[in-house]
Amino acid sequence: MVARKTAGIFLVGALIALAGCGSSSKSTSTSSKSSSSSKTIDIYSSLPLQGSSNAQTIPMVNGIKLALALAGGKAGPWTVSYTSLDDSTAAAGGYDATQTAADARKAASDPKTVYYIGEFNSGASEVSIPILNEAGVPQVSPANTYVGLTTNDPGSAPGEPGKYYPTGKRTYLRIVPIDSIQAAADLEAMKQAGCTRVAVANDKTPYGAGLADLLELTKADYGIDITSNTGIDPKAPNFRSYAATIKSQGANCFEFAGIVSNGGVQITKDVHTALPTAKIFGPDGMCTSSWTAASAGGVPASIDPLIECTVATLDLSAYPGGKTFLRDLRLRGHGARTEHDREPRTERRQQVGGAESAVRDQGPQFRARHLWVRRERRHDAEGIRPVQGRSQRRSGVLQDCHSDKGSQVDES
């Protein structure tokens, strides 16, 4: 998914390629009309801007806007028009499949669309990818990690990924590593924490259930016993009965494979009550202030020392241009801090041993080089995490926009 908080800085490089995309992505007649008349091309983002995920998605939108501002709103001779769409609803508290489909259809029906940034949730991308694929609209996700969107690796479902691409050509890519890599990071973190018997709960989404399955598939490599893998009802008022069950199973650690809005805070509190010394782990979908900061609706501060979450990227400041991007973000008012951002923040980062060798080749510009385990007690005010080197991404985007070969678009 994840974690996923990278769209803004990615777009800095992508904008350079949009002129090429605008002249070739959808159809010759459409592109010719756009370039000869209005000289305007359209970009859309579709992200859940309501619910707990907005601690990550609102900074994404700010990053996209900043990237466009830094480029002067231009890509070569084209003026770039950006529209932020919201695929969430207040009732759902997160993405809603019907709204996701509406967002994708809106972009697909616009003859000047050259790029679509989304989705944030892997389950949402299962909805939008086929719609945009049939329209020939290039799509990039800043957060999706579910393996089945682009591979038939273990953890995917029958018919994946082909069923998402009705044209037979790949039009989608993601800029974060897939969950087979995150599962390895989670298990390594558990091993280093001394966990031997781990209870896993998942939120029944493609992301959560898929990650939980991968934990089970690779647990033996780390000497960890998964005592149970349980799909929970995200709307349940509490999980006390579940917590009592995993206590009786002898679990000494717990992982919630899911996103915060799907019961992440409540299940953490209930498990902690039943197992007060157990380490509690979360993937990138949990690694946000809405889980880690009590003032943002997260878990009580007393649980902080016991929780860890994995993020498959480095902090933005560690990347070329990252510090400058953060400075510009603050100067332009997108880095304004909320009350919980002003609280003291401490964290531990630890490179996951052996992650380099465990990462399979995912393409020249999107190969994951590092995985970090993060214990995050307070939210990073910028909320944006990058991907690998900008110069590599530029060449990759140009390649993807002009390629008729799906393998060049499918980078992970």
Image (cartoon, grey):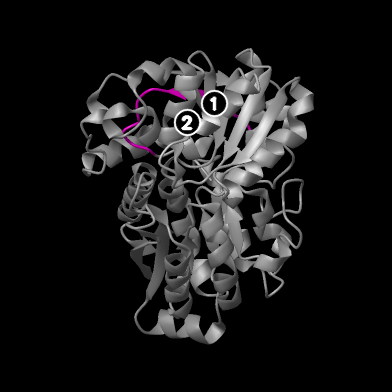
Give coordinates of residue 95: x percent, y percent.
43, 57
Q: Is residue 320 visible?
A: no
Q: Is residue 382 visible?
A: yes
Question: Residue 377 magenta-drawn?
Answer: yes
Query: Image height check: is 108 above or below 226?
Result: below
Query: Image height check: is 20 above or below 55?
Result: below
Give coordinates of residue 243: x percent, y percent.
53, 28
In the rendered structure, the answer to whether residue 14 lies left or right of residue 211 reads: left
Query: Image height check: is 281 above or below 207?
Result: above
The structure residue drawn at horizontal position 46% and vertical position 45%, both measured from the top left corner, is 262
- In terms of image quadrants, where is residue 113? bottom left
Question: Residue 291 magenta-drawn?
Answer: no
In the rendered structure, the answer to whether residue 3 lies left or right of residue 163 reads: left
Residue closest to the far right: 220
Instruction: Give the main secondary structure, helix, strand or loop, of the magenta stretch.
Output: loop
User: Do callouts 1 and 2 mark residues in contact (Cβ within 8 Å)?
Assistant: yes
Residue on which disc 2 sits: 240
Residue 395 badge: none
User: Callout 2: 10 Å neighbours few (<14), some, many (20+)?
Assistant: some
Viewer-side residue, 239 vs 187 = 239
- First to last magenta residue range: 369-383
Residue on which disc 1 sits: 244
The structure residue drawn at horizontal position 41% and vertical position 34%, both measured from the top left corner, is 265
Give coordinates of residue 15: x percent, y percent.
44, 58
Secondary structure found at label 2: helix
Amino acid type of the residue that numbered disc 1 sits on in the rendered structure: Ala
The structure residue drawn at horizontal position 60% and vertical position 29%, both measured from the top left corner, is 371
Viewer-side residue, 257 vs 149 = 257
Amino acid type of the residue that numbered disc 2 sits on in the rendered structure: Arg
Give coordinates of residue 116: x percent, y percent.
47, 64
